[in-house]
Image (cartoon, rainbow, N blue to C red):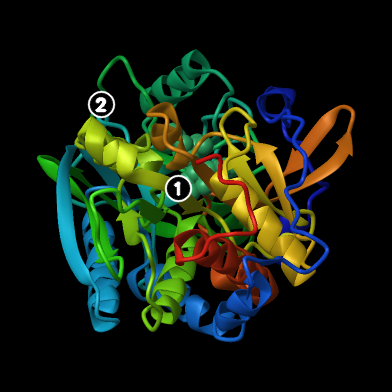
Amino acid sequence: MSKVFRRSSKVITSLLAASLAFGTVGYATTDSNNGNVNGKSSYSQDQKIVARVNAEKAIEHVRYLSEEIGTRPGGLEGEKKAADYIAKTLQGYGYDVEYQYFPVGDQYIANVAFNDGTFWEMVAAPNGKVSDEAVKGEVVFVEGNDYSQVNGKIAVMARASTTAGYRTQVNEAVAAGAKGVILQSLVGGRGNLGQTFNPSLTTSVDVPVYGASYIHGEWLKEQLAKGPVEVSLTSTQYSNLQSVNVIATKKAKTKSEDTKEVILGAHHDSVVGAPGANDNASGVGLMLELARVYQGYNTDKDLKFIAFGSEERGLLGSRYYVDQLTQAQRDQIEAVFVPDMVATSYDKAKNLYAMTPDGSTNIVTESTVSAGARLGNSDILPGTFGSSDHVPFHNAGIPAALFIWMGVDSWSPLVYHIEKVYHTPQDTIADNVSVERMQSALDIIGSGLFDTVRKQTPALDKNK
Ligand code: BES
Ligand code: ZN
């Protein structure tokens, strides 16, 4: 199986590279005195955190979320279980926790079950047969447009690159007598291997039509090479769904009218079919581990730990959160730290980037870049990127940044790398999580955030 993932490395499309162009930003470093400002050593403050945060503990949360629970599509049972786990953990650390529910659209979930009891999660086309009545049959992989073997079978094929193209494939397979169709995702944009997807059909067909990830198709081919494969197809339309943000608060030691608020927020959902170990059980694991360590310290600002729901469905949880705040509440928020994909083991993702949507620097990027400098940790770099829960805050004028491990091949033209297993069934601890990367992210984000919330926050000009 691992062979599949040692394919020649793919560069991320120029479209992505264009959207990734870095802003020109300088490093905010501390004085040569190791951040010793106002008679207090920032560095010794950092040590309170660095000496205590433990990547193994953070990864235990990643294990629970990605293995014990598994996939966590927004609005579904897995996401709810994740929310409960996060809430219980934060309550256990002594924080006040609340749930914030919001409505999300229907999900069409497909299950492909094998005789040995394993099953794969995919997306079911709403215009195909969506039913818990099983369609059982032998799998045939269609090469080119040779449909001669599909009558009475379940046709699997690499999807055409256009929507019109795969609609034709579906119609031809059904016309040839297929009793189910599984479309294998393309190799994928962003250099990744192609995630499960919703086949968009204009004309209804009365057989199940599922959108599989690229690796699902490769795994089926491997099984077929050994002998006949039988599967059982079932699917469900889930309606009237609610997704949920989990919000824990650590109150400032003394509260006044202008007490500021700082947020550490990570999404807890995953895409359909992906256990989301790095994306984003890693960000939640980091958040929970920092919550554990911070519980023993007083802060001069309110600190909120928020697990956002349904990020993968369009940043829905963070959008909802920002939308329901009054302007006065928004003005209180000084900084939003968003860890999303903070532990990949992908060798080319060499730096932890503090990304803002427009490349501007702010208290979040500067506090963490400064923390890196104090700690002698050169992993952290500033950069430009959207695509996560920092965007709604940024759009509301609130300083926010995303933390993510990425790689840059060369500066001209810019070529960025993220792991190939991003959004796939192989986003697992075994294939995509590094203890060292998690530890580095904990040290840097933990120290930068602590510097931002504690009483004396020197070390930086926070433009306030
Ligand atoms: N963790 C990713 C964001 C990401 C991916 C950043 C790759 C940088 C490189 C996030 O969970 C995600 O996939 N976001 C969606 C956003 C969309 C649903 C608004 C995306 O980028 O497709
Ligand atoms: Zn993510």
Gap in Å between the C-alphas at discs 1 and 2?
A: 44 Å
Residue at the limit of the structure toward the left, as seen here: 240
SS category of the residue bearing label 2:
loop
Q: Report if residue 40 is visible in the image.
A: yes
Q: Amino acid at mark 2?
A: Asn
Q: Report if residue 149 is visible in the image.
A: no
What residue sits 37% from the left and 75% below the top?
Answer: 298
For the residue with label 1, is its CB less than 8 Å from the closest atom of ligand 1? no
What residue sits 45% from the left and 76% below the top?
Answer: 289
**120 or 315, nearer to the observer:** 315
Q: Quadrant of the N terminus?
A: bottom right
Q: Is residue 365 above or below residue 289?
A: above
Q: Is 145 positioned to the left or the right of 37 in the image? A: left
Residue 135 x %, y %: 26, 48
- Disc 1 packing (10 Å; few <14; some 14–19; many ≥20): many
Residue at mark 1: 335
Residue 412 x %, y %: 90, 28
- Disc 2 packing (10 Å; few <14; some 14–19; many ≥20): some
**100 or 32, nearer to the observer:** 32
Residue at mark 2: 127
Q: Is residue 381 above or below residue 443?
A: above
Please tell me which of labels 1 and 2 falls first in the chain. Answer: 2
